[in-house]
Image (spheres, grey):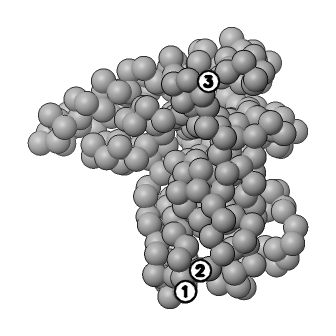
């Protein structure tokens, strides 16, 4: 990682070190599927352990910054946005679509980001103005969003963050399916955005996400050449991240599909 700053290198190492127990915990979950109580306690302990590890280690990198998780209300403009196990339900059910997401935010803008999936040993990272990458054994892969131009061939992902806006999600997903027929609901918005930055998805649309769940992925997409905007944004020619941060509703998309995705929700 010689071409990225020591700051981002330290965050990547911290995430992987703090998440070292998750791979073992994930392997043990299959044996606990028949014990509901045991499973819940096990998952809670896994989440708490990595949350504490991340807070301890990140504080060593920037002791002046608060560290927020999805259980917190984010205040201030500079902080660490951390999701210890994004896709927690997937993790609890032995599904490998989960990740650890960490973003360093300065003046309301993500400047460093790491999204790490221990189950597949995939590490995605980005730094503002320096590009987005997937870690490789010898060389890191530069990430680029897809070049897909037509809605009919686009693969779009989504995540249902909670049940409170069920009607809105049904309408959202119905509109996508009607126009494309290619919708995937993965349950892990951080991985959705990481995969979009590498061209595996062409767009991602999701409602009511916590800032800590999306902040790392937002930087990955932007540094990979994609666009981020709010679902109900009236003008798709501008990128207004403050609208995304306000309620967690976002559309992430490659440049070619920006206008066509916009028309679905116009």
Provide the residue designation for mark 2.
151
Q: Residue furthest left?
A: 34
Cβ–Cβ below 8 Å for labels 1 and 2? yes
Q: For the residue labelled by badge 3, is the local secondary structure a helix, a strand or a loop? A: helix
Q: Quadrant of the N terminus?
A: top right
Mark with earlier residue (3, 1) = 3
| Residue depicted at 38% across the width and 21% down the height | 21
The numbered disc on residue 150 is: none
Q: Quadrant of the C terminus?
A: bottom right
Q: Nearer the viewer, residue 16 or 225?
A: 225
Cβ–Cβ below 8 Å for labels 3 and 1? no
Q: Is residue 107 above or below residue 178?
A: above
Q: CA distance from mark 3 to mark 1?
A: 38 Å
Mark with earlier residue (2, 3) = 3
Q: For the residue labelled by badge 2, is the local secondary structure a helix, a strand or a loop? A: helix
The numbered disc on residue 179 is: 1
Provide the residue designation for mark 3.
12
| Residue depicted at 59% across the width and 50% down the height | 198
């Amino acid at each position: 990682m010689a071409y990225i700053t020591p700051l981002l290198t330290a965050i990547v190492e911290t995430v992987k070190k703090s998440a070292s127990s998750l791979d073992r915990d994930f392997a043990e979950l299959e044996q606990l599927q028949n014990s509901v109580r045991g499973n819940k306690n096990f998952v809670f302990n896994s989440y708490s352990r990595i949350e504490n590890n991340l807070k301890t280690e990140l504080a060593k990198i920037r002791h002046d910054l608060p560290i927020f998780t999805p259980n917190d209300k984010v205040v201030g403009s500079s902080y660490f946005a951390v999701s210890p196990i994004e896709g927690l339900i997937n993790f609890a059910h032995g599904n490998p679509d989960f990740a650890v997401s960490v973003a360093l935010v300065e003046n309301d803008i993500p400047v460093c980001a790491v999204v790490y999936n221990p189950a597949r040993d995939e590490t995605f990272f980005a730094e503002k103005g320096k590009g987005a990458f997937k870690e490789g054994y010898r060389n890191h892969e530069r990430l680029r969003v897809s070049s897909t131009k037509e809605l009919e061939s686009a693969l779009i992902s989504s995540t249902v963050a909670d049940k409170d806006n069920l009607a809105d999600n049904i309408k959202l997903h119905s509109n996508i399916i009607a126009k494309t027929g290619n919708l995937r609901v993965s349950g892990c918005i951080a991985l959705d955005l990481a995969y979009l930055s590498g061209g595996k998805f062409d767009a991602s649309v999701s409602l009511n996400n916590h800032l800590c769940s999306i902040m790392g992925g937002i930087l990955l997409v932007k540094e990979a050449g994609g666009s981020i905007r709010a679902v109900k944004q009236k003008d798709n020619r501008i990128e207004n991240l403050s609208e995304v941060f306000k309620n967690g509703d976002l559309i992430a998309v490659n440049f070619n599909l920006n206008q066509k995705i916009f028309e679905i929700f116009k």
